Image (tube, rainbow, N blue to C red):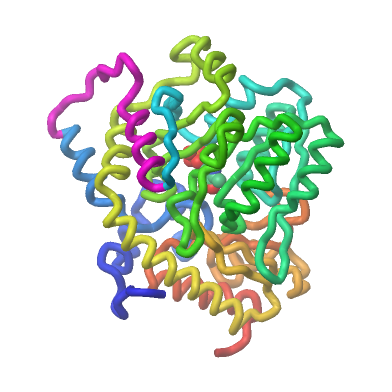
Amino acid sequence: MNGAPARGVPGFDDLDLDWLRARGSVKWHRPEPDVLPAWVADMDFPTPPPVVAALHEAVDRRDLGYPDWPDGSPLRTAFAKRMAERYGWAAPAHRVREQTDLIQCLQLVLHLATSDGDAVAVQVPNYPPFLATLRTMNRRIVPIPMEDTDDGWRMDLAALDTAVKRSACRALVLVNPHNPTGRVLTYDELTELAAIARRHDLLVISDEIHAELAYAPHRHIPFASLSDDAARRTVTLTSATKAFNLAAIRCAVMHYGPDRLLALRDAQPPDLYGTVSPLGVIATLAAWEHGDAWQRDLSTVLDRNRRRVHDMVRDRLPQVRHHLPEATYLAWLDTRPLGLTEPPVEKVLRDGRVLLDGGDPFGPHAEGFLRLNFATSQQVLGEILGRVTEALGGQER
Ligand SMILES: Cc1ncc(COP(=O)(O)O)c(C=O)c1O
């Protein structure tokens, strides 16, 4: 950890439990009052001050009429600017379209670009609503394993090459940085992936929602920025909601690389997939344009917390496998070596009164895993880690 003062970071480490429990959002609202939640990917930190100020300002103006956006919302140029500044990617603003959230973005692109019964490659484990989407839409899942190696999680690119060939698959859902393992693919890995995509003429649907949560020295590289060919075959999905803790604002962007898909999108009835709320746009713009100082503090806190989780596992649950995440605030813990006779998520809830996400919904071979959300204050995290280690029979300090 570099730079977090011993007493904690103001605005992040001074969370009030009564305030957390009184929140209406699902993370704290659903569990029973004696349970500490470390499940769903929402952070416990209050909304960034610049976002609160921008929303207040709009409401105080009493100005909630129809927006005047004949050429699309201001998100289009704001997205292009952010990509250029952060990643050196010259993403043309005219290729950006607004949607409410990333699950909708994925469903839309699958709807436009693939058909019933088509094969779609996807990393496993994966964000459960993405796997559920593929099943509901009756797309054949072609699972691409994330492999646990001594050097960390690796996406099995050779398996991708073979599986795509065998299944006549034409689309890949790429989650990078990856939920739940926290892997950030390197330039070399992405380049190899781009070569495979080119060889098999794959459409790449690239979910980059965790991009701004990468820890140095790991560096996010937008897939579409790799080459002209990658740009032409990639639809990029993102939003400010993960990195600025704004899940409820329901505002996301899609950047369409393929001309044909953009034309298909624009040929749809304009409101069929809904339109974004101006308040969502205001919040996103405030986050992107004025939220960087808040995000720097956030990253100090999360970096400290990820190391704390990692150290706890190493020292008190040495049989549990865990790799320090390279991005995100999610720890992916393999408890199978403990030989438990019940799902660990149930044991931790019953014996430790902590609600985590169990591995099962994340795909095949993930039962026995736990996903722990460490985006909380040092005090709450300390309590969570103490309870979890005890419930799993951890060693004394
Ligand atoms: C990889 C990934 N994609 C998408 C989402 C959800 O995004 P949204 O709330 O915009 O649907 C999440 C939420 O945790 C996620 O981890």
Q: Quadrant of residue 163?
A: top right
Q: Residue at x 72, y 63 (%)?
A: 148
Using the image, determine if residue 338 lies above or below residue 329: below
Quadrant for the C terminus in the image: bottom right
Please give left or right for residue 156 compared with residue 29 in the image: right
- On screen, residue 39 versus residue 56, left or right, reads right
**Pick the front one: 64 or 112:** 112
Coordinates of residue 32 in the picture (x, y in percent): 48, 58
Q: Is residue 179 visible?
A: no
Residue extending farthest bottom:
397
Q: What range of the chain is rendered magenta?
A: 60-86
Residue 242 x %, y %: 44, 48
Q: What residue is drawn where x is 59% and y is 55%?
A: 186
The residue under the point 40% across, 34% down is 251
The answer to if 75 sits in the magenta stretch is: yes
In this rendering, position of residue 267 left or right of residue 173: left
Is residue 258 within the magenta segment? Answer: no
Pinpoint residue 232: horizontal percent, then vertical percent.
58, 28
| Quarter of the figure with residue 324 | bottom right
Residue at x-position 51% and y-position 36%: 237
Residue 204, relative to residue 322: is it above or below? above
Observer-nearest residue: 46 or 298? 298
Q: Position of residue 358 (x, y in %)?
A: 64, 57
